[in-house]
Amino acid sequence: MSFLNDLFSREIWRQFHALTKPRVVQLIVFCALIGMVLAVPGAPDGAQLRLILIACFGIYLVAGAAAAFNCLVEKGIDAKMKRTAWRPTAQGQLGDLQTLLFSVGLCAIGSTVLYVWVNPLTMWLTFATFVGYAVIYTVILKPLTPQNIVIGGASGAMPPVLGWAAMTGEVGPEALILFLIIFLWTPPHFWALALYRVEDYRKSGLPMLPVTHGSEFTRLQVFLYTLVLMAACLLPFIYGMNSWLYLLAALVLSLGFCWYGWKLLQNYSDELARKTFRFSLIHLSCLFSALLLDHYLL
């Protein structure tokens, strides 16, 4: 009876919801949505809109499942870090079995939705992304190498590919360009966070780059990645996916990110690292919004 009371309590579902990392998952779905929209010439019709909504729902569920599994595996590490100590798994509010069943259930429902109502390719790509993030990155790479973010970034870069596959049933070069942008964006984004959270990561025992190689080397890597990222951000225009509106936005945003990277390299402070991290979120969100606006307006 106690189990049933817990199951139907509002508090436990708030805890489950927190495990899905809602802000992260919203960004994932947004990037997948951009892939879907860009895959459709012109405005989507009624059937395509229905497909977009279903695909977003399925991807949301599987992404939430991966986040919950990540919280389960890293509950001990999360408990040592101020940034993550509030998570229900870290505080012991949710048991291992509860979290595992929740993750498996979300993944199963999301995968079924994608397989039945979208297409098998999208389902398998989304499931592979789940395995890549929840198992390969979280369990194997993250505690093993300071390049964990670089290698594991492949999973985080998949949403536009999933979106493109949902609408076309294939993975086109346009989707791979969007994948490359997010793949190159991930290291400077995450290393900016790791720089001002370095003591948290030191306590956790994770071999993050600022812990293993120091602040100066990490800041150099952040700056170099912003330069390479800027080149990748020009590819949609060069390939003919978008026009001058996107190009203008990409140049402004990329130069801004490079400027933050340069300032961070020259004169470090925790506050500047925080600003760089926040700007990285603005960079990706506005870049993909520009892709969307350019697609419809020009």
Image: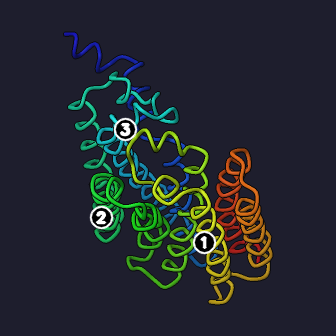
Q: Which residue is mark 2?
A: 128
| Badge number at residue 225 | 1
Marks 2 and 3, how far apart at CA: 25 Å
Labels 2, 1: front one: 1
Dot placed on the residue nearer the N-terminal end, 1 or 3: 3
Q: Amino acid at mark 2?
A: Ala
Q: In terms of image quadrants, where is residue 171? A: bottom left
As drawn, the residue found furthest toward the top would be 1
Q: In terms of image quadrants, where is residue 23? A: top right
Going 55% across and 56% down the picture, which residue do you hit? 190
Seen from the viewer's position, the closer of residues 188 and 18 is: 188
Q: Amino acid at mark 3?
A: Ile
Q: Which residue is mark 3?
A: 77
Labels 2, 3: front one: 3
Q: Amino acid at mark 1?
A: Tyr
Tell me: residue 166, above or below residue 264: below
Q: Is residue 81 visible?
A: yes
Going 71% across and 55% down the picture, which residue do you hit? 279
